[in-house]
Image: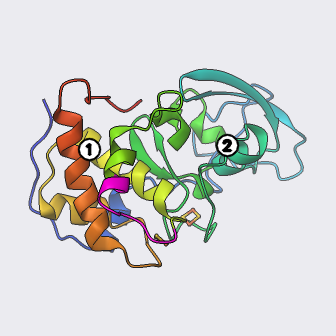
Amino acid sequence: MKKKSEPQNPSRRNFLKNVGVGTIGGAILTGTSGKAASTSTAIEPDSGPIPLRLKVNGDTVNVSIHPETTLVEVIRDHLGLTATKIACNRGECGTCTVLLDGKAVYSCHLLALDAADKEVTTLEGLMDGEKLHPIQEAFLAQDGLQCGFCTPGQIMTAAALLNEYPEPSEEQISIGMSGTICRCAAYPNIAHSVKDASRRLKKPGGNNEQES
Ligand code: FES
Ligand code: FES
C-alpha cells in the first residue's frame, strides 16, 4: 500500500533532503569487481578502467569505466541513451534525473559505481518501443514544456512522484517536482501535466508501473 502524504514544507531545500542528489566522491572500488560496496573508502584517482555491470532499462550492460565516471556519462557516452540531458552538471538543476530503483536521482551527481546492482531507468526505458508513455503524452497534451530541455528530467521526476503517489495532491506535486528546475518557468503546465499523467495512468491499459 502506498504511504500517505505527511505534512511537509514544500521547499526545494526539503526536496533535496529526500531526492537522491548523489554520492560523488563517496563510492569505493572493490578490487576490479566494479562494484561500489560502501561509501567508506576513498577512490584511487589513478585507477585505470574497471569493469562495471549495470541494469539499465531492463537490460544488463557491461561497461569499462574510470572510477570517477558519473552515471550520466555512462548513460549518454557509453550507452548512447541521449534522452537524459546535462545542464548544470553539479547536482543543482535536475535536468539529468533518472530513476534508480524507482527513485529520482541526479545522474550527474552519482558515480556509476554506485548504481551497480540497481535498476536504472531513463526516459527511453519508459517508452514502449515508439509508443509514448502516458506521462509523455500528458506533457504533450498539457503543453508542459517550452524549450523542452528540462523535459526529460521533469518526466522522470514525475515518474518517481507518481510511483510513490499515484494520485498526488497539489502539495505533493509541488514538493515532488521541486528538484527539477525549468528555466522557461513552465511550472503551471508542468503541474497540470503531472495531474493529467495521474489520470492517464489510472485508465485501463494506462497503468504502466515505472521500472524500479
Ligand atoms: S545536470 Fe545534473 S543536476 Fe543539473
Ligand atoms: S521547458 Fe525550457 S527549461 Fe523547461
Q: Identify the disc placed on residue 162.
A: 1
- Counting from the top left corner in percent of width and height, residue 176 is at 28, 58
Amino acid type, callout 1: Leu
* Label 1: which secondary element: helix
143 drawn magenta: yes
The answer to which quarter of the image holds residue 141 is: bottom left
- Counting from the top left corner in percent of width and height, residue 119 is at 50, 30
Q: Around disc 2, counting alpha carbons within 10 Å, would you say few (fewer than 14), some (14 to 19), or many (20 or more)?
A: many
- Counting from the top left corner in percent of width and height, residue 193 is at 28, 57
Against 116, is 158 above or below? below
Magenta span covers which residues? 139-147
The answer for how far apart the CA atoms under marks 1 and 2 are is 23 Å
Provide the residue designation for mark 2: 75
Q: Main secondary structure of the magenta part?
A: loop
18 drawn magenta: no
Q: Residue at x 43, y 71 (%)?
A: 181
Q: Does mark 2's beta carbon lie closer than 8 Å to ligand 1?
A: no
Q: Around disc 1, counting alpha carbons within 10 Å, would you say few (fewer than 14), some (14 to 19), or many (20 or more)?
A: many
Amino acid type, callout 2: Ile
Q: Residue at x 46, y 32 (%)?
A: 131
* Label 2: which secondary element: helix
Quadrant housing the C terminus: top left
Q: Is any atom of residue 40 visible in this view? A: yes
